Amino acid sequence: MSEALNVPTMAEYMAAGKRPEVLFWVGCAGSFDDRAKKITKAFVKLLHKAKVDFAVLGTEESCTGDPAKRAGNEFLFQMQAVTNIEVLNAYEIKKVVTACPHCFNTLKNEYPALGGTYDVIHHTQFLKSLMEEGRLTVEGGQYKGKRITFHDPCYLGRANNVYEAPRELLRKLEVELTEMKRCKRNGLCCGAGGAQMFKEPEPGNKDVNVERTEDALETKPDIIAAGCPFCNTMMTDGVKSKEKEASIAVMDIAEMIANAQDL
Amino acid sequence: MDYIANILFVILLVLGIGYFTRNIRKVIRNIRLGRDIDRSDRKNERWKQMAKIALGQTKMVRRPIAGILHLIVYLGFIIINIEVLEIIIDGVFGTHRVFSFLGSTYNFLIGSFEILAFLVLITVVIFWIRRNIIRLKRFLSPEMKGWPKMDGNVILYFEVVLMLLFLIMNAADFKLQLLETPHYYDPAGVMGSFPISQFIKPQFDNMAVSTIILIERTAWWLHIIGILLFLNYLYFSKHLHIMLAFPNTFFADLNPQGSLDNLEAVTNEVMLMMDPEADPFAAPAEGSEDEEPAKFGASDVTDLNWAQLLNSYTCTECGRCTSECPANQTGKKLSPRKIMMDTRDRLQEVGDNIDKNGSFVDDGKQLLNDYITPEELWACTSCNACVEACPVSISPLSIIIDMRRYLVMEQSAAPTDLNNMMSNIENNGAPWPFNQMDRLNWKDEA
């Protein structure tokens, strides 16, 4: 059985005259994609566990405009951005956490010039700081000693130089962290970025996600850890194309930490 | 009559440097055809970036073999230039080894030049083997056929010839000094040290002094003529990076790689739309009816900014970008290196057009379609691997995005799937057809 999660909205906070510590930007994938919704829920459970005072925008949230911008539709991107900024500024948001590196990058780097300046962090960074503040315990549990490789999302890694937060969390889970031959700043894309997620690939001899999954499989992992809902989809599809889905799971780090505590 | 050689030398020098200057001014003129962009901020960071990446070669050595080999040629190139200064002074004034008053320092310098010259020779041979025998994949892409392949080899032949001439010149000079030949001989002792060319010297053992002088003079003249030819070859080759790497790293985008610029022309429109006070029927501001409406994105080189055009002249076609590109690795047509080469070739074509006609006359061509196809542009995942790989801070991605902007905003020519995605965002605030009112449903789902 599963009970409904307590997920307060900014509107409710406003009505109660309160301000949350942090706004959780769920993102489109986190709101609508069946696989990504599980990541969202796992992250919310961790927020509750760490007693973080958070809220979401709920129905007032809209696409950041990232895929439109990368597809070349600057107009649509800026319309989205300006609308979102109006909402965020009206609630006087200071700090935003998101589990999507694309939302993270856009909110952090592309909103300030349009009037939206916030302290934006990726959920792995936030979880790491909660752990360091002693608010959240991250420990091995079922993942202790498991062989795990981390796939760097382009928009977290190369785009914003965040390489250590996710790895730090994995180390705390006492996993056997193994790196792919192409990792960190040399990490290979999963194939979803630049709006590729929403279209068929151009003619070629292979799909990018298969190429990347081969990198991961070379490390003989039990689990491929991800930090991006789109990478998660691409790697999951890649593992399926290699018919390895029975033995290799693709999981977000937030899910692993939540599972380790049986949340 | 004694001065003929000196005069000839000065004429050669003036012609060589003059023609080079003329062409460099064309390069600068062409780069300025680009749109304006402000890269004058954060000077300290820019100097640091240039010192680290261009001067310090930090990104080159990320691939250790190519990086260290390149470092040798780079150091050789810079340091041997001190010797060229002496050659120029000797040439103009008819002196012999004018810096030799430096004594042991001079001997040390000449000795190091010789060792560097030798190392450069070996390195260049390895480079040639990599290109022509090992045939590294990144040197064999479709865009490297024909002239670009030849260009890469010509540079290597140039280096071999220059280094050999330098060593032969030194060997003959050394021999002539030992033979106490007037003009070469100094009673104070041998000028220079010759750790490498001493092994060439025995070849002259049974030659007449006049023959050795002829060899020395020939090598000396061919060496300096070769240098002037090399200098002038740069403009016609991919090799401008030896100069442009410095401004290019200085003017590179300092923002996080994930950050794309927000088009200002679009911001103005969006702000107007969002402003409840704006009067949609207001008369246009004085004089604004003459202004052409801003073009969104880029279909030709003049729609790109000058930093992007500088990027294109700086590219030396090493192909690290293409070898890291996920689209290229999986057989798609996109090659970030080709994006840069096409931009440069088109810019050069536009520049030549201006030279010929006084100002640009429409040639019925543009960067889009005639050089770069939409298929290449749509294959990009915007992952920044190409940007990360470039040893001199070139961004092929920024050009790809600007050209996508043109395709989408000026031509509505996005692939159907992307049009669907965009209309979803427009209508319901998500790239998929889900209602915005359902955004929080996940919290109640099992």
Image: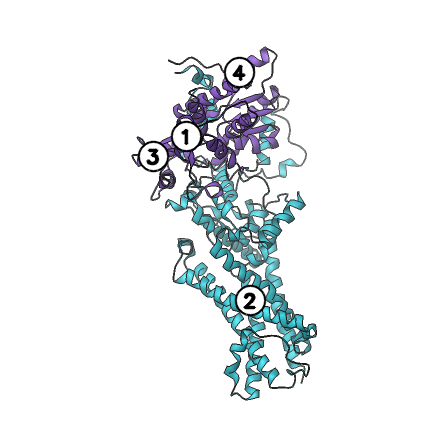
Point out residue A40 in the picture as x, y percentages from the top left corner: 45, 23
**Residue where numbered disc 3 is placed:** A239
Contact between labelled residues 2 and 1, with CB atoms less than 8 Å apart: no
Left or right of residue B203: residue A201: left
Q: Nearer the viewer, mark 1 or mark 3?
A: 1
Contact between labelled residues 3 and 4, with CB atoms less than 8 Å apart: no
Of residue A263 and residue B271, the one placed in the foreground of this image is A263
Q: Residues within 10 Å of mark 4 (few under 14, many from 20)?
A: many
As measured in the structure, the alpha-carbon distance from the residue carrying label 1 to the one carrying label 2 is 55 Å
Q: Residues within 10 Å of mark 1 (few under 14, many from 20)?
A: some
Q: Quadrant of the N terminus of chain B?
A: bottom right
Please check whether the numbered discs 2 and 3 fall on a single chain. no
As measured in the structure, the alpha-carbon distance from the residue carrying label 4 to the one carrying label 2 is 69 Å
**Residue where numbered disc 2 is placed:** B116
**Residue where numbered disc 1 is placed:** A144
Contact between labelled residues 3 and 1, with CB atoms less than 8 Å apart: no
As measured in the structure, the alpha-carbon distance from the residue carrying label 2 to the one carrying label 3 is 52 Å
Point out residue A33 in the picture as x, y percentages from the top left corner: 41, 24
Q: Chain of mark 1?
A: A
Residue visible at 66% across and 72% down in the picture: B104
In which quadrant of the rendered view does residue A218 lie?
A: top left
Q: Colour of chain B?
A: cyan
Q: Colour of chain A?
A: purple
Give the residue furthest to the top: A16
Which numbered disc covers residue A9? Answer: 4
Q: Nearer the viewer, mark 4 or mark 3?
A: 3
In which quadrant of the rendered view does residue A32 lie?
A: top left
